[in-house]
Image (cartoon, rainbow, N blue to C red):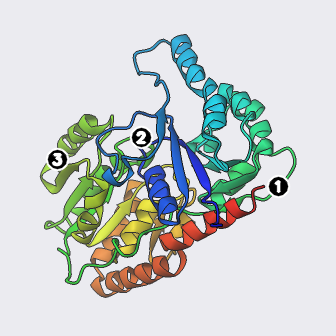
Amino acid sequence: MGVKRRHICLLGPGNNVHVQRWAQALRAENCSVSLISTTPIDATWPPALRSLPRYVMPVATAGMRPAARLRTLLRGWGRVPALVRALQPDIVHLHALPTPAATPLLRLVPRLVVSVWGSDVAERDRRKAQLYPALLAHAAALTATSHYLAAVAESYLRVPRPIQVVPFGVDVSTFYPAPAAADPFLIGTLRHLEPNYGIDLLLAAVPSLLPQEPRLKVAIGGAGSLARPLQHQAQHLGVAGAIDWRGRIPHGDVPAFLRSLSMFVMPSRAESFGVAALEAQACGLPVVATNVGGLPEVVRAGETGILVPPNDPPALAEGVLTLLSDPQRQAAMGAAGAAWVRERYDWRSSVAQMLAVYARVR
């Protein structure tokens, strides 16, 4: 008689590339996978997952009043226990904690693995402080993407318990250095155009960079609510001609984008982990990043990149100029970063670590 395939039900944002990667990886490990998505599933859903059993929760829209929004969210989360009973998975894996009001419903779900992602626990408020501890205590296992985030999650625990750090690793068969040198004057970033990611700080640094290196170009990939204000900022600063706005870049095109750069800049105001920095390093890029959150874990200061204080455009400019003026150091950091990711953050290792977490759940 054959060994029963383990059924993992993923519970989280189905439109997020990390949830999609977990679904594909678990299938590749011969797990049966289903999905309860907390977000709509759009055209970015991978064709390889089209046959995946999935349920999409009712979604609160931006125009809803707060009371209607909460009712919609609770209606969706309220269906989760019944869906789990119908699906009968061996494990339910919650990716990112929900709105605090939904946590009592999740305490009805057995064999629940909880992965904290970032703002779910880092952006603390009174309701989270009241309701998250009971859910974290109920979970069969807890994981976090970084030691920084694990420490934040631990602050919610009333009784200490282990939190396994399982990073979002990098597929090094896809993210690898370019065979030939990139344009030495093209630097860039790839982030959501939202306040936390500090693209305005990068733009504010450019006026200090151009007099030192007039050939400099800055490629900015990503979309978000600040797209138009950031473009206006570039025009106001007189640097619009140096900025190449790439818009949203599909995940499959990210490696080619990174390999076209000579340096990656990550000016975040807050960062729970820093997978973008890892992907850039895997592609052989030195990284200039802010010293916040989980970034010091993934960027080795002085070895694979330079860490600067947050909210400090002059310091950001100085970090970029330090590398622009020293191509040999830039190349050495890029090579060290690629080796660092292969050694510590290979996606296959992340999958093995998560499977080990599942194996301990009874």
Mark 1 belongs to which amino acid?
A: Arg
**Where is the N terminus found, in terms of image quarters?**
bottom right
Farthest right residue in view: 159
Residue identifier under label 1: 161
Describe the element under mark 2 as helix, strand or loop.
Answer: helix
Q: Is residue 22 left or right of residue 78?
A: left
Mark 2 belongs to which amino acid?
A: Pro
Q: Residues within 10 Å of mark 1 (few under 14, many from 20)?
A: few
In percent of width and height, residue 271 lies at 52, 53
Q: Residues within 10 Å of mark 3 (few under 14, many from 20)?
A: few
Q: Residue at x 46, y 80 (%)?
A: 342
User: Cα distance, mark 3 to mark 2?
Assistant: 21 Å
Q: Which quadrant would residue 304 be assigned to in this image?
A: bottom left
In percent of width and height, residue 31 lies at 55, 59
User: Cα distance, mark 1 to mark 2?
Assistant: 33 Å
Residue closest to the eye, 61 or 26 = 26
Q: Residue at x 43, y 78 (%)?
A: 337
Residue identifier under label 3: 238
Mark 3 belongs to which amino acid?
A: Gly
Residue 31 in view in this figure: yes
In percent of width and height, residue 98 lies at 61, 34
Look at discs 1 and 2 and give the one toward the viewer.
Answer: 1
Look at discs 3 and 1 and give the one toward the viewer.
Answer: 1
Q: Is residue 134 left or right of residue 321?
A: right
Q: Relative to 97, does residue 260 appear above or below in the rendering? A: below
